[in-house]
Image (cartoon, grey):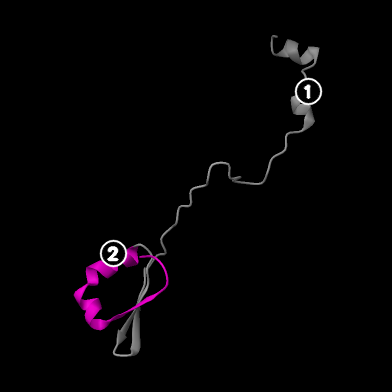
């Protein structure tokens, strides 16, 4: 249940604290209200790191262009250096 902040009553907070804490660990935030007055917020101490997996084909960094010289044939001297 990750999304906008949810308001819960003090009774709900006391009755279902473990459940709410599990949701807070996932990043959910709760406002705890007494009657119609907001009293406190139940929020995670550390924000969870969201690991976003790239989709197949997504570019991860700046595009890289190969220079045309990378595709040029090797010279005779370069072929000798490689033992070819």
What residue sits 58% from the left and 45% below the top? 58
Magenta residue span: 1-25
Specify few, some or many for label 1: CA neighbours under 10 Å numbering under 14, 14-19, or 20 or more.
Answer: few
Q: Residue at the location (42% across, 72% down)?
A: 4
Magenta span main SS: helix
- The x, y position of residue 56, in whole percent, is 54, 42
Q: Is residue 21 left or right of residue 69?
A: left
* x and y, in percent, of residue 16 in the image: 22, 72
What residue sits 77% from the left and 18% below the top? Answer: 74
Residue drawn 23% across the image and 72% down it = 17
User: Pointer 1: what residue?
Assistant: 72
Q: Position of residue 30 (x, y in %)?
A: 35, 75
Q: Can you give x and y, in whole percent of width and height, for residue 18 in the image?
A: 23, 68
For the N terminus, the quadrant is bottom left
Q: Secondary structure at mark 1?
A: loop
Indicate which disc, 2 or 1, sits on the residue closer to the N terminus.
Answer: 2
Where 76 falls versus 62 (above or below)? Answer: above
Query: Element type at marker 2?
Result: helix
In the rendered structure, does residue 2 fall within the stretch colored magenta?
Answer: yes
In which quarter of the view is residue 2 placed?
A: bottom left
The answer to whether the residue labelled 2 contacts the one labelled 1, judged by CB atoms less than 8 Å apart, is: no
| Residue 24 in the figure: left or right of residue 76 | left
| Residue 42, placed above or below residue 27 | below
Q: Is residue 7 magenta?
A: yes
State the CA–CA distance, disc 2 to disc 1.
Answer: 59 Å
Per the image, the residue denoted by label 2 is: 22
């Amino acid at each position: 249940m990750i999304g906008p902040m949810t308001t819960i009553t003090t009774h709900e907070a006391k009755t279902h604290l473990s459940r709410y804490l599990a949701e807070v660990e996932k990043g959910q935030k709760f406002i705890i209200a007494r009657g119609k007055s907001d009293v406190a917020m139940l929020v995670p101490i550390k924000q969870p790191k969201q690991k976003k997996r790239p989709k197949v084909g997504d570019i991860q960094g700046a595009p890289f262009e190969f220079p045309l010289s990378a595709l040029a044939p090797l010279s005779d001297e370069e072929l000798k250096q490689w033992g070819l």
